[in-house]
Amino acid sequence: MFDQNLVFLDLETTGGSVGYDRIIEIGVVEIANGERVAEWSTLVNPGRRVPHSIQVLTGITEEDLRAAPAFAEIAPALLERLRGKVFAAHNARFDYGFLKTEFARAGLTFEAPVLCTVKLSRRLAPQHDKHNLDALIVRNGLFCLDRHRALGDARVLWDLAQIWRREIDPATLAAACADLMKRPAVPAGLPPDLYDTLPETAGVYTLYGDDGRSLYVGAAANIRSRVLVQFTGERRSGKDLRLTADVRRVDWNETTGELSAHFEAARLVAQLQPAHNRLAADETCSWYWRSDTPEIPPRLIGTNGIDDVEPEHLYGAFRARSGARNAMRELARTYSLCHKLVGLEPPGAGPCSAHTAGRCRGACVGKEPAVSHAMRTIQALSRLRIKPWPYPGPIAIRERHVWSERTETHVFDRWRYLGTAHGEDEVAEIVRERGAARFDLDTYRALQRLLKSPPRNCQIVALAA
């Protein structure tokens, strides 16, 4: 691999969003026949402000960039420099995605075989946990005079490649490179470079069919990874296989984070009514039961009813009544509960079907005290209970984009999504006008996960009730 014509390339950018951020520096080390034949670097005027954190990290100031050329000015010469060569970079999809997008803005098409040195390092040295550039510099005793500058980091990659050539069996190295550079199959009817253009950031993607009708809307922490799994994963569902056969176009929107992706996907599902999404919000149901009146059996209530009661009296959140009944049947079997007293059969004289089959202790015919049955019911239903809202009032979750300075604030109360704000005044307005926000199963689960283990880019703030 490293005897071929290739380039080791590194970029410095204003942030990590391909659609939002811009390149501020490019560094290239050109290799031919196993030898370094040229180096090239340039600053690039991004046409927008550079975050202070990026200026501190790279040492590149906005003043440095004022006299630098715009990307469109250097694009033709850079494209010629890269043409016909393997594109090698650390976290290569990041650099490749930025370059491909910038070339497209300049009206040029860029495609190249890609080799990611992060993935190659993981393949060659799986015993190590860290494979970022700093870790590789320390582990291999490399020297980098200009860390976090494009040409300095590109030089480190060439130095690292030479170590691999000396220390790794050539057949092992060649096999690892060949495997990493294999291109996954793209569904028929889609552009062959689809996977190269998909961003590796949180967002929403939409699949369209022949007639332009939407087939599926998905939210993802990493759009590219999720689409790859959907189209090429080893354990694809029948739905994924049908989508792979029918899809003709893929659109996507990057979002601030996973929460933003969740709500944007919900909005698009409601708007587009895609054929393969669950359009079952109105079917969501839960068992309603009050332990202080155990003589009244649990009853199934739908979404509208869920919105009218306190979540602490709800048990389970199901997409369909059949799933709710199956869950209750399983609890009744495990805890020997009466089918009449847990809402599976209508009340009335005579034993329930479970008692007839020897699986009920007889609460329905007076053989078991009601209090004993109630205690077992409490124990059984505790496994399904909707958790109490852990705050005295509404909360705001400030979600910051992992690379840029973009922030969105999502407001919730009693597991219900109230709205998204882009400023403090909007937060107060959303709380004041909370209205009849609905309980949503997916939002409940997403919040449960987030509150249990908050991402680093999220800050949770309790608001006044």
Image: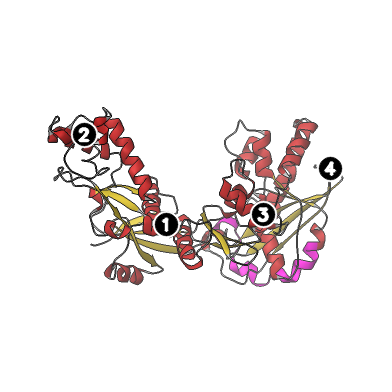
Quadrant for residue 27, please give it.
bottom right
Q: Secondary structure at mark 4?
A: loop
Q: Does residue 332 belong to the magenta stretch? A: no
Amino acid type, callout 4: Asp
Query: In front here: 198 or 361?
Result: 361
Label total for image: 4
Q: Gap between marks 1 and 2, in whole Å?
A: 32 Å
Dot label at residue 280: 1
| Mark 2 vs 3: CB contact within 8 A | no
| Mark 4 vs 3: CB contact within 8 A | no
Which residue is the site of mark 3?
Answer: 195
Which residue is the site of mark 4?
Answer: 3
Instruction: Pick whichever of labels 4 and 3 is earlier in the sequence.
Output: 4
Q: Gap between marks 4 and 3, in whole Å?
A: 27 Å
Mark nearest the camera among 1 and 4 is 1
Residue at the top extreme, as displayed: 358
Mark 3 residue crowding within 10 angstroms, few (<14) / some (14–19) / many (20+): many
Q: Gap between marks 4 and 2, in whole Å?
A: 72 Å
Magenta extent: 56-79
Quadrant for residue 54, please give it.
bottom right
Instruction: Pick whichever of labels 2 and 3 is earlier in the sequence.
Output: 3
